[in-house]
Amino acid sequence: MTALTRDQVLETLKTVRGPDLERNIVELGMVSDVFISDGKVYFSITVPAERARELEPLRQAAERAVKSMPGVKGALVSLTAEKKPGAPSAAPAPARPHAHGHPHAHGPAAGAPQRPAKQNIPGISAIIAVASGKGGVGKSTTAVNLALAMKANGLKVGILDADVYGPSMPRLLGIAGRPQQIENRIIVPMENYGIKAMSMGFLVDEGTAMIWRGPMVQSALMQMLREVAWGDLDVLVVDMPPGTGDAQLTMAQQVPLSGAVVVSTPQDLALIDARKGLNMFRKVEVPVLGIVENMSYFIAPDTGARYDIFGHGGAKAEAEKIGVPFLGEVPLTIAIRETSDAGTPVVVSDPEGPQARVYREIAEKVWQGVQSASGRAAPSIVFE
């Protein structure tokens, strides 16, 4: 069987009439770049922002047309609302009370721009973003061990890999295969070590280069969040992409985050970028639960001597300077690197070891921060 091509998909989409019922959606220039991987087709349809809900049947028609093509195993089609320059803004959605009583749920100051209300995710009590101002600081390793530590502390936990361009969760959690799709386009999350997980890495091959533009990434993130059967969770940990670009801003503005954890290494260069991440969350009124200093120090396995390879204490000093909690120091160890690469994170491979204890203590502080921000009494967790 010949490989499915972009041109074949576009030819099929020419059978779908646009909103004017005269020309098709391809002729109208409404179809984004088409991405094909493993028999699955991904694309978005650009529509006016004020007509997005009205044109949902158009999206469904395009999805049905592509799914009917020979060789197509599935299709993920989304509407992208594009606001033209100079066009009037749509009326803001009426404010809704947040289920978790977030401290940022109060209205903006007089004269401040009104943001759309964030829609809660049914069944999920709290959503925590794990972010960094730059790549290479061990954010994903921290996110997965934090999620597993929360599970070890007795919580029901899921993790969303929001890094579309460089998904890490399939490898970190040792999960292979594709998730199943059930009725109404809902995806069943993958699972290992007792936590549910969703990642673009489950939908495309590991070596596939993602070349999506911003709107496609934003749409994919919202679908992985809102069209997944998460069930009842105490907390969903979101492994954010590094930096402060469109994807990060979309998550911060559109997702009802209970708070954010910022990961940094001790050196000044990393802290400069971490500061940008902190400022982004503050601007969109997401509570900063604290800073983790990753790769804080190195203990030589042969001599036990300690080396501050990247300096030491920079993240703690920064936390004190800007008035946010310091959550803890994670050492630079061979065990964390090896277990992460093997898909057996240190919290599950060595649950009583010193590294796992560090993550569990950080998880306790993070959860206490969430509970405090929501106005509920935090449970007491005892380490034996």
Image (cartoon, rainbow, N blue to C red):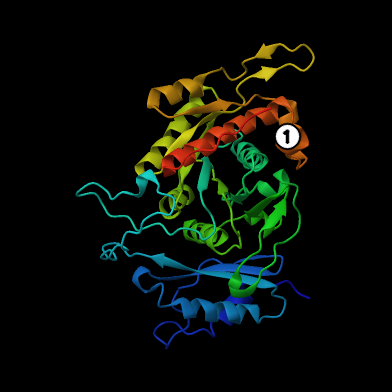
- From the viewer's side, name the closer residue of 378 and 213: 378
Residue 290 sits above or below residue 231 on the image: above
Q: Quadrant of residue 2?
A: bottom right
Instruction: Specify whether 127 is left or right of 70.
Output: left
Q: 311 or 253, which lies in front? A: 253
Decide: is 263 above or below 42. above
Do we see residue 202 in this rendering?
A: yes
Residue at x 31%, y 49% (from the top left corner): 106
Q: Up-down: is 72 above or below 345?
A: below
Q: Quadrant of the C terminus?
A: top right
Residue furthest to the bottom in view is: 22
Residue type pointed to by label 1: Val
From the viewer's perspective, is residue 377 above or below residue 20?
Answer: above
x then y, percent, for residue 89? 28, 63
- Residue under the point 74% across and 16% down: 300
Horizontal and vertical percent for residue 3? 73, 71
Instruction: Residue 33 in the image: state x and y as whole percent.
Output: 54, 66
| Left or right: residue 220 compared with residue 153 | left
Across and down, in percent, residue 256 comes to: 44, 52
What's the residue at 39%, 85% (across, down)?
20
The answer to which image quadrant residue 96 occupies is: bottom left
**Residue under the point 61% across and 34% down:** 138
Judging depth in this view, the residue of 283 and 364 nearest the camera is 364
Quarter the N terminus occupies: bottom right
- Label 1 sits on residue: 346
For the question of whether residue 284 can be seen, the reply is no
Q: SS class of the residue under badge 1?
A: helix
